Image (cartoon, helix red, strand yellow):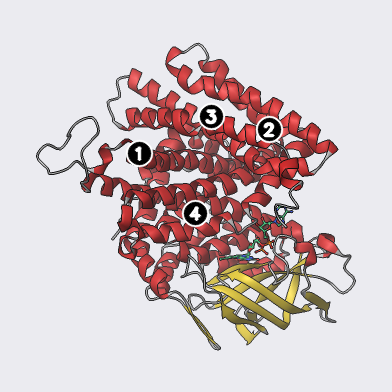
Amino acid sequence: MWTYQAPVADMLHLLTRVLHAPASWAAQPAFADLDTDTAGEVLAQASRFATEVLAPTNAVGDQQGCTWAPEGVTTPPGFRAAYQAFVDGGWPALACSPDAGGQGLPQVLNMALFEMLAAANHGWTMYPGLTHGAYASLHTHGTDEQKQTYLTKMVSGEWTGTMCLTEPHCGTDLGLMRTKAEPQADGTYRITGEKIFISAGEHDMADNIIHLVLARLPDAPPGIKGVSLFIVPKFLVNKDGSLGARNTVYCGGLEHKMGIKASATAQIVLDGAIGTMVGQPNKGMQGMFVMMNAARLGVGNQSLGLTEVAYQNALAYAKDRIQMRSLSGPKAKDKPADPIIVHPDVRKMLLTAKAYAEGGRALAIFCSVLLEKSHYHPDEKVRKDSDEMLSLLTPIVKAFLTDNGWQATTMCQQVFGGHGYIKEWGMEQFVRDARINMIYEGTNTIQSLDLLGRKVLGNNGATLKKFGKLVGALVAEEGVNEKMAEFITPIAVLGEQITKFTTEIGFKGFQNADEVGAAAVDYLRVAGHLVFGYFFARMAQVALREIAAGNTDPFYPAKLQTARFYFAKLFPETATLMRTARAGSKVLMDTDLALA
Ligand SMILES: Cc1cc2nc3c(=O)[nH]c(=O)nc-3n(C[C@H](O)[C@H](O)[C@H](O)COP(=O)(O)OP(=O)(O)OC[C@H]3O[C@@H](n4cnc5c(N)ncnc54)[C@H](O)[C@@H]3O)c2cc1C
């Protein structure tokens, strides 16, 4: 059986010492009263919920999954109680706006909470995760009446939310969507169609489910420019806020899947269901993008949680399991063999997971701070710059953290040898659960096209250059510090290489767009390493300063060791990635005979 300790110390360290979130809060009236102690207490309470209440429901959720019946879906044993405890604890409201009944705490605390939840039970976390995304979309784009009707109950957790985009014939290409919305004389719409793969689409944990549905108006232009967004509640809501008639939106069945078995992945049938429009006709993607962007950060965060929990358990196992002797001579002479942690490759697998967790956490927290600033900072320029940087980094959070999470959970499973393949240890569940994160919310290929095509080449690399300026400032600050050279030189070199690399792909892409498609996935990993390298250098900077100041906490030398491992063993894959990206599209596209 696996265990989990929430990494609260690392979270607080990143928040306070590396990314200076309290200074950012002080500059924003919405959070000016928040101090580090309060933030620490929130994280400690979140950790208790995740480890004591939620983690015990994970294995049973995986074994039993959800059960479909015509009357509804039953979640696994313990799920309803855990959800009620979550609601009673006020957790759904944590980072929601006070005008909707939320606690108005910074998004970064919510991000940390959701890392813990995903580590404890990824499947369960889908239900509140989707609700928070739906909240964000309605809070930004809903009318006052829609907010009044739905938001308070979603913020309290009494009702949950979904996002309904995918249809049997359209996933990535939402322009192919067929679900129809017929305007009614009373200003509502009758929505008819079939959605598939809808997470948290039906369940027994809340009184109402608020579906955010994309559909087409009768006169809509073809393609993505003809898609509108609608609220379709499971139960209609009376004027006084009480639940009314059952709406004609049904769950036709659940998918049987590889992982996150406790998350109800529902086929949703809309049979003239009553809905109201969110935002403007044919501009549905604007509202949905708020939810999708929140969800993309959330999905990266899910893999971060799984990386952390898999690492913790693999580490404990590697210290305990004895097999063979160390190549350099026995280490545990009192035992018949050494613990497997003495073997270099076992250490490499452990350190890979640890580095991906710590780098990923730094990036996730950095992005949450940007998200806060983009909404609440009093200076409009700061809001705009933060939004722009967040937009650049979002596909990296989604794809880099989830690709890394897949590698990390697989490596941690490998540390267990054959026992990693056996259910009772829990490691194979982490691997199965992690796999979906590379697929939903836009596959990782689509994220890489978004990064390279839209966010980098689409604005001539302007935002990437702004990130380059952050790297440049750190290089200028620490360039003469010999102790920092091993952390600074690699990012300085990659920073220069990536500028040339981007120009080169842009030029080739101008002549043949397939060149962009052929390079994009490799490109995203290179950009991911530039970002991770920057954060590892900053973490190393803090560690070196603490050690120089006489701090003897082993946390700091441990950070340096992890950073050294990262730069020596993981970061150098950028050279191979740039080389394979440069190999271009011809070897992919001139292969009709090979793929005949
Ligand atoms: C467990 C689970 C939960 C989900 N939850 C939700 C949910 O809550 N709401 C919702 O609406 N949807 C949900 N989805 C759907 C999910 O977002 C889609 O499956 C995903 O976006 C991919 O769409 P698709 O499956 O139709 O694949 P396709 O779009 O058919 O893609 C197939 C392959 O082609 C590639 N491809 C497609 N277009 C391009 C291109 N232009 N360039 C390069 N490669 C391309 C893709 O990357 C992929 O590898 C969920 C799916 C699953 C499995």
Between residues 364 and 254, which one lies in front from this camera angle? 254
Q: Earlier in the sequence, mark 2 or mark 1?
A: 1
- Does the image show residue 485? yes
**Could you tell whether 508 is left or right of 560 in the image?**
right
Task: Tell me the quadrant of the picture where the C terminus can be found.
Answer: bottom right
Residue found 29% across the figure and 31% down from its top = 554
Looking at the image, is 341 positioned above or below residue 592? above
Q: Position of residue 77 (x, y in %)?
A: 38, 76
Point 79% across, 75% down: residue: 180
Please name whichever residue, 378 or 496, is drawn nearer the observer in this view of the structure.
496
Sequence-wise, the earlier of marks 3 and 4 is: 4
Which residue lies at the image location 34% right of the left edge and 56% below the top edge? 420
What is the crowding at mark 4: few (fewer than 14 residues within 10 Å), some, or many (at least 20)?
A: many
Residue behind mark 2: 464
Which residue in the protein does label 3 denote? 534
Q: Amino acid at mark 4?
A: Gln
Give the residue pinned by disc 1.
Answer: 345
Secondary structure state at the residue bearing disc 1: helix
Q: Tell me which amino acid carries mark 3.
A: Tyr
Quadrant for ligand 1 reads bottom right
* Residue displayed at 69% across by 66% down: 165
Q: Earlier in the sequence, mark 2 or mark 3?
A: 2
> Which of labels 3 and 1 is toward the front?
1
Query: Which residue is under mark 4?
Result: 302
Mark 2 element type: helix
Q: Label 1: how many residues lie within 10 Å, few (<14), some (14-19) or many (20+)?
A: few
Q: Position of residue 249 (x, y in %)?
A: 66, 81
